[in-house]
Image (cartoon, grey):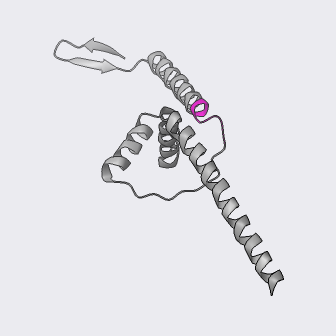
């Protein structure tokens, strides 16, 4: 785009070459952002649906990501933010997974104890 003076005012004239260059730059930026998003999400398919309620501010943040062409949809924006949150708190989730595994082992032990007690009681009758 360039400015042209006609003696009275300045007028912007669109240069087709400038437009083409700007379109190419925009496409390159979109591709780079998409690649970055895919890399941050580990290139995994998103096959699980989760319904959430958000505040107006939360939805506005998702829409900002769409406007900035960081995401193509609210779903993609939400998935991006969740993935980034998990990555940023990896130590927390590692610890959570450890405790969850311990709880699952304790549940299995309790269930096995109950099963054995039932079996013993039924043979005593």
Depicted 68 relative to depicted 52: above or below: above
Q: Where residue 110 sits: x, y (%)?
A: 66, 64
Q: Where residue 3 sits: x, y (%)?
A: 29, 14
Nearer-the-camera pick, 9 or 50: 50
Q: Where residue 120 sits: x, y (%)?
A: 79, 76
Q: Residue, x 16% and y 16% (percent of image)?
A: 8
Nearer-the-camera pick, 29 or 37: 37
Q: Quadrant of the C terminus?
A: bottom right
Depicted 45 relative to depicted 56: above or below: above
Q: Quadrant of the N terminus?
A: top left
Outermost bottom residue: 125
In this picture, which residue range is highlighted in magenta?
A: 38-44
Outermost right residue: 123
Depicted 102 relative to depicted 13: above or below: below
Q: Residue, x 63% and y 49% (percent of image)?
A: 101
The number of numbered discs placed on residues in the rendered structure image is: 0
| Side (left or right) of 57 relative to 22 | left
Nearer-the-camera pick, 105 or 29: 105
Q: Quadrant of residue 124?
A: bottom right
| Side (left or right) of 114 relative to 63 | right
39 in magenta: yes
Q: Where residue 83 sits: x, y (%)?
A: 53, 39
Q: Residue, x 53% and y 21% (percent of image)?
A: 24
């Amino acid at each position: 785009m360039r400015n042209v003076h006609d003696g009275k005012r300045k007028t912007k004239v669109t240069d087709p070459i400038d437009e083409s260059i700007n379109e190419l730059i925009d496409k390159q930026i979109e591709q780079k952002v998409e690649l970055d998003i895919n890399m941050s999400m580990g290139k995994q398919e998103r096959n699980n649906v989760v319904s959430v309620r958000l505040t107006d501010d939360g939805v506005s943040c998702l829409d900002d990501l769409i406007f900035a062409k960081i995401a193509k949809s609210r779903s993609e924006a939400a998935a991006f933010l969740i993935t980034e949150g998990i990555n940023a708190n990896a130590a927390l989730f590692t610890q959570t997974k450890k405790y969850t595994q311990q709880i699952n082992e304790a549940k299995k032990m309790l269930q096995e104890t109950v099963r054995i007690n039932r079996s013993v009681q039924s043979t005593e009758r």
